[in-house]
Structure formats: C-alpha cells, structure tokens
Amino acid sequence: MSKNAKTLNKTRETTWKILLRRLGETAAALFGMATLWLIAYVVVGNELLVPALSDCLNQLGGLLIDGEFWMGFLHTLGRVFLAFTLSFVSAAFFAVIAYTVPWFGRILSPMLSALRSLPVLAVLLIILVISGAGVAPVIVAFLSLFPMLYAGFLAALCQVDKDLIKMSRVYNVPLKRRILSLYLPSAAPYAMRESAAALAFSLKLVVSAEVLASTYKSLGGLMQDARLFLEMPTLFALVSITFFVGLILETAGNILAEFVERRVK
C-alpha cells in the first residue's frame, strides 16, 4: 500500500472516531435534557408550566408532518445562514485588514466594543421601525455575530508564528504560498472552532429576534403563537427542535474544525 493510501485511510479512521465521539456527546446531552425535563415535570406538577414529555413528543410528531412548520423552519434556517455568512465574510475581511494595518484595528476596536454592549431588545425595536419583521432578525444576529467572529479571526491570525513570518519575508516567499502554507494552516483550526460556536449561536439569536418581532413564517413566530394560545406542548416541542438543530449545527461545525485541524498538522 502506498504512503498516500495509508494517509487517506488514517484520515478516514480519524474522521469516523471524531464523528462517533461527537454523536456520543450529543446523545448524552439529549439524555440529560430529557432527564431534567422529567424531574421538572414531577417537581412542578402543573402541565400549563411544564407539559408531559409524551405530550410534547406527540406534538413534535405532528409538527414534522405539518407544512406550515416546515415553511417556518426553512425561513428561519435561511435567515440563520444569511446572518452567519454576512458576519463570517465581513469579520474575515476586517480581521485581515486589522492584522495587516494595526492602526485600523485600533480604530475599529472601540466600535466593536460598542456593538457588543448594545441591548438586543432595544436595537430590535429600532430596526423594526426601519425594516420589516423578516429582515430584523438577520440584522440583529449580524450585529451580535460580527464582533464575535472578528475577535476570533484576529486572534487566530495573531497566533501565527512571528519567526516563520519573518523568515518567509527574508527568503522572499511568494504571498500566495505564504497564505496557503503558513497563515491558513496556523489560523484555520482556531477560526473554524469560533465559526462552529457562532453558527449555533446565530440560530439562538435569529429565533429569539423572531419571537420578539412576531415574524411571520418562522420558528420564532410559531413559538409566539403557541405562547399566546397557551399551547405549551407545542411551545416545548418547538423549543426542543431549536435546541436539537443548534446541537446538530455546533456538532457538525466542531467535527469539521477537528478534521481541518488534523489535515493541516
């Protein structure tokens, strides 16, 4: 067997180990949530506050065959990926500029600190006056995700070995080769982990904004309707779906991050 074939087989085995470990962690998290739910149900003893797990599972099954639910789910997922993509591209762009032009980073830093301290509810109310309830969750998520991703990307770039950078300049290594062989292998794993956390966080941000804005055709809008009509099993089922999807997104992102990390080593 050739050396390349052995490396490929080893990479596949490692990927499967990572996947199995992550699936085990996800299953443990779901089991823990179900256990806490049952304990809360017994302790509270009021189905208007904490419905039975069996009722929620029945509602969950009903939601999965409901076209209105899937329409709202897909709209929410679209907003999540749109907000994440805009934040990812913008953060990467400005992080590279701040890394190469330090004075620009110093100017940008207080602006990002101000963005982090913005109250989400107040910002959402202002944005709702300017834009519609379908656009506002994307803007709110972007305002929260952009500073987080920017800080992560800039920290990843700053971790690149300074001595290697100096050596590449001394020996006039082409910029393209420096980017592909030095910057990306050093910064990519850390940046991918930050992105995985941000992707799951974007789902929470978008759904929360949808609830506050009563966005039509969305998971948040369906939650708001269930709350208004006191349909607690439906509300808990929708929250469970959001939790499960967020867990999937973060798990997939972490698997990809570990795969990239092992590939560049």
Image (cartoon, helix red, strand yellow):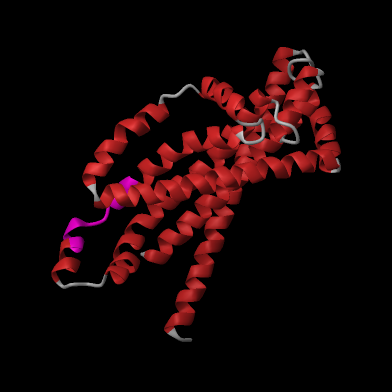
Task: Residue at 82% x, 42% y: name it.
Answer: 64
Q: Is 160 inside the magenta-drawn segment? A: yes
Between 60 and 151, the residue placed more toward the observer is 151
Q: State the residue in front, 227 or 135.
A: 135
Q: Position of residue 257 (x, y in %)?
A: 47, 55
Residue 43 in view, yes or no: yes
Residue 111 percent location from the top left of the image:
34, 32
Kindly tell me whether residue 52 is visible in this rendering: no
Task: Name the residue at 71% across, 34% down.
Answer: 219
Quadrant where the C terminus sits is bottom left
Give x and y (percent) for residue 81.
Answer: 59, 47
Residue 185 sits above or below residue 119 on the image: below
- Whole-percent x and y of residue 167? 16, 66
Quarter of the view holding residue 52: top right
Region of the chain picked out in magenta, as a range:
154-165
- Relative placement, left or right, of 83 versus 187 is right
Q: Is residue 225 above or below residue 77?
A: above
Number of numbered discs present? 0
Above or below residue 183? Residue 121 is: above
In terms of secondary structure, what is the magenta stretch mainly? Answer: helix
* Res. 162 image quadrant: bottom left
Q: Outermost residue, left direction?
A: 170
